[in-house]
Image (cartoon, grey):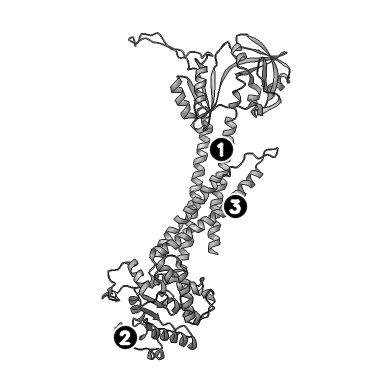
Amino acid sequence: MQTALILGGIGTGVGVIIFLSALISGLQASIIERTLGTQAHVVLQPPEEEARPQLDRAHQDVLAHIQRPAQRLRTILGWPRLLADLRSRPDVTAATPTVEGSAFALRGTANRSVALRGVDSDSYGGILDLRSKLVEGTFDVTGTHAVVGVELAKELGLGVGDTLRLVAPDDHTELFTISGLFDVGITDLNLRWVFISLRSGQTLMDLSGGVSSIQVKLRDIFSAEQVARELGAATGLKSDSWMTLNSQILMGLRSQDSSSIMIQFLVILAVVLGIASVLVVSVIQKGRQIGIMRAFGTRQEQVLRIFLLQGGLLGLVGSVAGILLGTLMALGFQRLATNPDGSPLFPVALTLQLYGRSVLVALGTGLVGSWLPARRAAALDPAVAIRNE
Amino acid sequence: MALVGPSGSGKSTLLNILGLLDRPTSGTVAILGQDCSDLDDAGLTRLRGKTLGFVFQFHHLLPAFTAEENVYLPMLADVGHFEPAMGLRARELLGRIGLKGFETRPANQLSGGQQQRVAIARALAMAPSVVLADEPTGNLDQASGNQAFELMREINRESTTAFLLVTHNPGLAKRCDRTITLVDGRIA
């Protein structure tokens, strides 16, 4: 009876930990995937232009109003070399040059302002796999082909094979043939992104031979800030990581982490106290038996070990129950929380690592919870314990 | 040897002190010539396990364990892990006390007399020099009490194991080799 209760307690505790961990890591993985699904991990851009007033430093008493310069679209100097260097780094999984700028998309009398992305069709897939996001046509940005989002296509009445006129800010105009329509799941991007070839981008933006940014994907996404700082220092370029560009999301993830750790800590504490209180009662009940064992030559450390072993076993068995419970809860939640189309909102992350960690935590909890009762059992005076009829 | 005396005369206290379960407030206990005053708990436990056996008024077996397991408990505590020889010795002792066939019976499914005999077998497991018995027949009916007492007498005659018996029963005391009477904590 006592054993069943205590196992229930440990099982519930471990179950909550597993459920919570699986839920939060699943949620975070999903948030990160959505955020990074359309973003590079690190973006390198030309350094910002700064005003360099020709002012004599000796005359500090001159009143001066220094205006910040407008940032022109410029190229990254020596980008092919930089790109090769980046690709040879072991922590970089993909790097691709792009030309980014704004333009107007015209069709008939309709026009929309769009964000042009001149990309290298071979390597861009490593940053954003547009082929998997296509709803129609193919991802073909060679020559004068362009790929646009489904929203823009709807606004301008475009379909695959239709012609689109793109007008750059300096009135430079080019005609493109639509080769495919994509849907990245974000309306604004579906409306604004127009993919063309790197060369067409260079022509339209008047940036012949140049690129306006290099996008980098890393093996470890959480090293992005570190890598961005390194690259910035090494190249003198403006180097931003997704972590800086999405600092609010990152902060959200961090606070989610810490509240989850806090809850898990409190659950563990409650389970430890539960184990301790049940075992203390058990030590009192079994006092006489402990006394007999002591009278027959059982040493104190042997008694201590027996109770610690009991705590450890309770932890282990409880963790098995907890793993079952937590897995059921997590899978049940995944089934309940679904998108309108019936697919799960996000997959819960039930990993072997999580299970392994839970078993260790439960084992530790059992040992810690049984420490005090075990000490008490070992310290029992056999004469008193036996006399206590 | 029988230890007799009215209630409160200190019989059980003396037994506990001799059994190294209690420490004397004054004086010393020597077992096989070894002074025990300076021993720590581990030392006392070791000495107790090897040289002394206990039989209590209530059998004090571990109820969830079998007769055999109860008998080899002292050996297990001494060595720290199980050896097949322990089981053999336990079965041999159970055979000696007439409980052949009950080896794997849980202790709480034996009769009172049987339990007390298992307790005697347990006390003998380590072949102790002295068995200290606190009213070993006090909780048994006449017949089983007699049987238990005779068993101890026989073992005493067969081996070098001495028995120190606390008893209220003058009949039993008379059948012992020697009787010590305690009055108000003093040997009368």
Query: Gap between marks 3 and 2, in whole Å?
Result: 66 Å
Chain of the residue where label 1 is placed in the rendered structure: A
Q: Are marks 1 and 3 on the same chain?
A: yes
Q: Are marks 1 and 2 on the same chain?
A: no
Mark 1 against mark 3, which lies toward the viewer? 3
Horizontal placement of A387 versus B24: left or right? right
Q: Classify mark 3: residues with Cα within 10 Å, few (<14), some (14-19) or many (20+).
A: some
Residue drawn at x 30%, y 68% is B39
Q: Amino acid at mark 2?
A: Val
The quadrant the N terminus of chain B occupies is: bottom left
Q: Is residue A182 above or below residue A309?
A: above
Residue drawn at x 50%, y 37% is A254
Query: Gap between marks 1 and 2, in whole Å?
Result: 80 Å
Q: How many marks?
A: 3
Q: Classify mark 2: residues with Cα within 10 Å, few (<14), some (14-19) or many (20+).
A: some
Q: Is residue A42 above or below residue B108?
A: above
Secondary element at tag 3: helix
- In the rendered image, residue A106, in percent from the top left (x then y), is placed at 68, 14
User: Pointer 1 and pointer 2: residues touching (CB < 8 Å)?
Assistant: no
Q: Is residue A87 above or below residue B144?
A: above
- In the rendered image, residue A384, in percent from the top left (x then y), is placed at 39, 72
Q: Which residue is mark 2?
A: B183
Q: Is residue B113 visible?
A: yes
Q: Amino acid at mark 3?
A: Leu
Q: Is residue B61 visible?
A: no
Chain of the residue where label 2 is placed in the rendered structure: B
Q: Which residue is mark 3?
A: A324
Query: Gap between marks 1 and 3, in whole Å?
Result: 23 Å
Mark 3 against mark 2, which lies toward the viewer? 3
